Image (tube, helix red, strand yellow):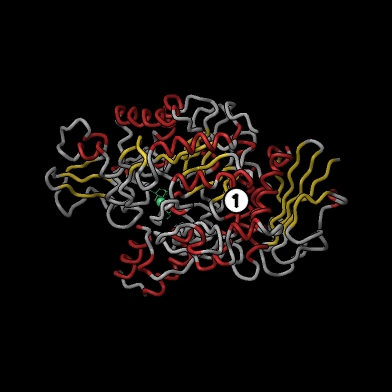
Amino acid sequence: MLDKTKRGWFKSAVLYQIYPKSFQDTNGDGVGDLKGVISRLDYLQKLGIDGIWLSPVFASPQKDNGYDISDYCAIDPMFGPMEDMEALIAEAKKCGISIIMDLVLNHSSDQHPWFREAIKSKDNPYHDYYVWRDGEPDCPPNDMRAAFGGSAWAYVPHLGQYYFHQFAPEQPDLNWENPDMRRGLYGFIRFWVEKGVEGFRLDVIDQIAKEPDNFITGNGPKLHEFLRELSREAFCEEGLVTVGEAWGADVERAKLYSAPDGSELSMVFQFEHICLDQEEGKSKWEAIPLSLPKFKACMERWQHGLHGKGWNSLFMDNHDLPRIVSRWGDDGAYRVKSAKMLATMLHGMEGTPYVYQGEELGMTNIRLPLESYRDVEILNLYAERTAEGEAPEAVMEKIYARGRDNARTPMQWTAGENAGFTTGEPWLPVNPNYSVINAEAALADPDSVFYAYQKLIALRKEYAVIREGSFTLLCPEDEQVFAYTRDLGHAHLLVAANFTAEDAPFEIPEAFAGAKVLISNDGAPGKGLRPYEAYMLYIED
Ligand code: TEU
Ligand code: CA
């Protein structure tokens, strides 16, 4: 068991993200809840993970599925009473699993008491907790757009002012220039630390230092000043794990975020690799095929850039991303094998791996009728694009490929009704392939994706070369194979992965002759790599 009072325990850990709404329902209302998470701790302990990143369960009007918080110190009744949260923290700790809560510090819900006060008048003490500009109707301060469509400015007639919102209008941006507002947020964090929470995921943390007059949203001039204060004032215990969502992070900035002295955060989620299969400078909806050499160069840059200078998170899936086996693997004939290949490729690297609920089962994307979708981003995209004249079926194809609800369909537990997720009407349809893809079947199948993840998680614990070794990319220009080595003193690891459904030429380096096969998705390594074949070889010299 990891000593979680010590800074850096996350460097040997594997963390699991739960989207509570879709994980396990226990009261038949069709929505996942905290008792549901508690009921699945044995499954998570079997997988071998060390912590759970819990997407928001705070009080929320649910405009953006909880990323619009109306009370940072209360649990939304849909997930259960505070006692259930306290029970989850305690029960998880008994299983050696830390709870990492998802904090949204960039914006609140428009139903938060702070905003309900702020909107009353310009001289209300809470007014300056948000970002306001005087203006006339239909003439916003500038033409900045919100991530979910439309203007980033919402007009309040009785104030003759606009407020700034980088996401939905129901998610007004908080003003980090205001020290009282910051202190208020730090108080919320301390409330949860005192309850035994051992970490935080920080939503769009790179956007808190916004300067809308200068058209700045991410990476604002005061960002690291604010983060250092946040770390000093709120993340005092050295064992706390903090991971910031930073869409705009590059390696140099990530060195600040994840500085080994703990002056900011433990690590960040950067998204350079995830954005490589979209047209340069375009949104995620304009997808292009992934260039494997570009992907490899990106991962190499991050492995080298943070080695000994910071810390990487390692992920391919989360609640905002399409399922990786559908995106970069093959969710047809090679679903199981390609899911294992992707996991082997990722889990051999230096950093903290994150497993998103259902990724360990090889869960896939889904194609729903428009009326079944729930995500505000999807619904706004459809309305906006079709209003601009884009063909509805073309917009639907983009939603099928990139929509966030792909990741939010209920966890598939069994082949029974609603995949064992709920006895009620699920808030979002269950993927019909649950009859084949479900945890019960996976646990009964020694060759399932689940056991590959279990093995990869165990290997990280067992082999220091996986946790700490240096990274060397092999065959950088190869369009089919991602191969690299890790080295730590006399210990050497080779990871080889074929990203395609065709045989791929590959020579195992001489130095690995006679090496031990730590994991393979296709029996003993032979000449070249078979379709989606992946393995890890280990040798000591
Ligand atoms: O996501 C930030 C974010 O930028 C993504 O939503 C991104 O805009 C989109 O997925 C890709 O186009 C965080 C949370 O992870 C997300 O669920 C919230 O909706 C968002 O912030 C607002 O809180
Ligand atoms: Ca429920």
Classify 18 as above or below 266.
Answer: below
Residue 346 image offset from top left, x and y in percent: 64, 50
Q: Where, quadrant-wise, is the C terminus in this rendering? A: top right
Residue 317 image offset from top left, x and y in percent: 54, 53
Residue 228 appears anywhere in the view: no
Tally of numbered tags? 1
Query: At 13% across and 42% down in the image, what residue appears?
Result: 159
Label 1: state its secondary structure.
Answer: helix
- Residue 356 or residue 402, whichever sits in front: 356
Query: At 23% across and 50% down in the image, what residue appears?
Result: 154
Residue 80 appears anywhere in the view: yes
Residue 5 image offset from top left, x and y in percent: 57, 26
User: What residue would you read off at disc 1?
Assistant: 298
Q: Which amino acid does the dot numbered 1 rest on?
A: Cys
- Residue 274 is left or right of residue 396, and the answer is right
Q: Where, quadrant-wise, is the N terminus in this rendering? A: top right
Classify 119 as above or below 148.
Answer: above
Classify 430 as above or below 116.
Answer: below
- Residue 109 is left or right of residue 22, and the answer is left
Query: At 22% across and 33% down in the image, what residue appears?
Result: 126
- Within the image, what quadrant is residue 221 found in? top left
Residue 330 image offset from top left, x and y in percent: 61, 66
| Mark 1 crowdedness (10 Å alpha carbons): few <14, some 14-19, many ≥20 | some
- Residue 21 or residue 466, whichever sits in front: 21
